[in-house]
Every structure is written in structure tokens, then in C-alpha cells.
Amino acid sequence: MANKVETTLIQPLYEALQKERFVMVSTIDHETGAPNVSAVSWVYAPSHELVYIAVDQRSRIVENIKKHPATALNLIANESTYSINGNAHVKEEKLEGVPLKLSLIQLAVSEVRDVMFYGSKISSVPKYEKTYDEKAAAKLDQQVLDAMKKA
């Protein structure tokens, strides 16, 4: 039996996207037309219908969505793996209030699917560590989240 397809974020996914976390972003490469997958951590859902992603202005993600807006996020949360699909665009070329040159991508959610293989669940979500100064990383992460919330 197929899983139900949602048209907005379910509550556990919305809650998971209220803070920084490991997410994979899939776009269509603007040069080759092939799939392009990137790992990001600055994500935020301002509503059940939208997801914001902050990326370096030079990120391939930016050029990819300008040519092909179709985008998918892979999110591991709620003991499962989800594919969040929709069309993305650059909401802000330069995210204000952040010392880095970041662009803000807005994904309009059109489809949410639980894509975990049958008969299993995620027992541990991916964890990562910042490899630079912990205090500087925490300060920057908070600046980016605050800027995304204001956008």
C-alpha cells in the first residue's frame, strides 16, 4: 500500500525545521541537466507551506534553481525519511543581518512523501560537528536563523 502524499509539512516535520539540521537538497544542474545533491544545515520552515534555505551566494544551488526551480529536500526526522518537493526561487540575493554573503532560497512545498523503505525506522538522526570555533559557529548559526525568521 502506498503512503499518503501530503501537500504541506506535517506537524513533526514543521517542528523539525524550526532549527538548524542536516538536510540534503536536490536540484537540476543548470549546466548538465543532471541531478545535483548538496548537504545544507541552515533550514527553517516559516509555515507548513514554505521552507527557507540559506546558502552561500556562490552555491551551485542558486544557479540551478534560477534555471530549473524544481527542488527536493531529503529530511530525516520523525523516525523516517521524507522527500519534500516543490518549486524554489531566490527570495533574497543577500540575506540581511549576516556577516557572510548568503542567499535565501524559498521552497514552496507541493508534495511531502515518506520515502523510508518498508518495515524499518530511523533509530538515530545524522549528527555533525562544526570544525571551526564553537562560539563563532553558534553565533553565526543564531544570526542566520534570526535573519531567516525576519525574511
Image (cartoon, grey):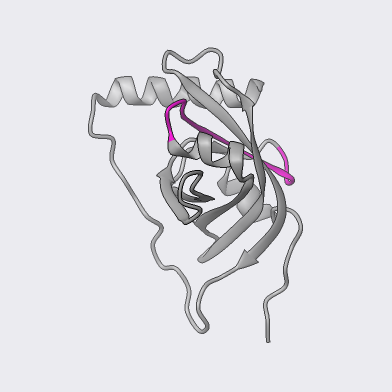
Q: Is 73 located above or below residue 89 in the figure?
A: below
What residue is drawn where x is 51% and y is 65%? 79
What residue is drawn where x is 40% and y is 46%? 39
Task: Give residue 29's position: percent from left, percent from top.
Answer: 48, 48
Which quadrant would residue 114 be assigned to in this image?
A: bottom right
What residue is drawn where x is 44% and y is 68%? 122
Task: Out of 151 and 142, give the one closest to the viewer.
Answer: 151
Q: Is 15 located above or below residue 144 in the figure?
A: below
Q: Which residue reaches farthest bottom?
A: 1
What residue is drawn where x is 68% and y is 81%? 2
Task: Give residue 96's position: percent from left, percent from top.
Answer: 56, 14
Instruction: Say if the magenta span includes residue 29.
Output: no
Q: Is 26 located above or below residue 133 in the figure?
A: below
Which residues lie in the magenta part?
A: 47-59
Q: Is 125 located above or below residue 5 in the figure?
A: above
Task: Give residue 119's position: percent from left, percent from top.
Answer: 50, 84
Q: Quadrant of the N terminus?
A: bottom right
Relative to residue 129, is residue 102 drawn left or right?
Answer: right
Which quadrant would residue 6 be assigned to in this image?
A: bottom right
Q: Quadrant of the C terminus?
A: top right
Task: Give residue 110's position: percent from left, percent from top.
Answer: 73, 54
Instruction: Say if the magenta span includes residue 49.
Output: yes
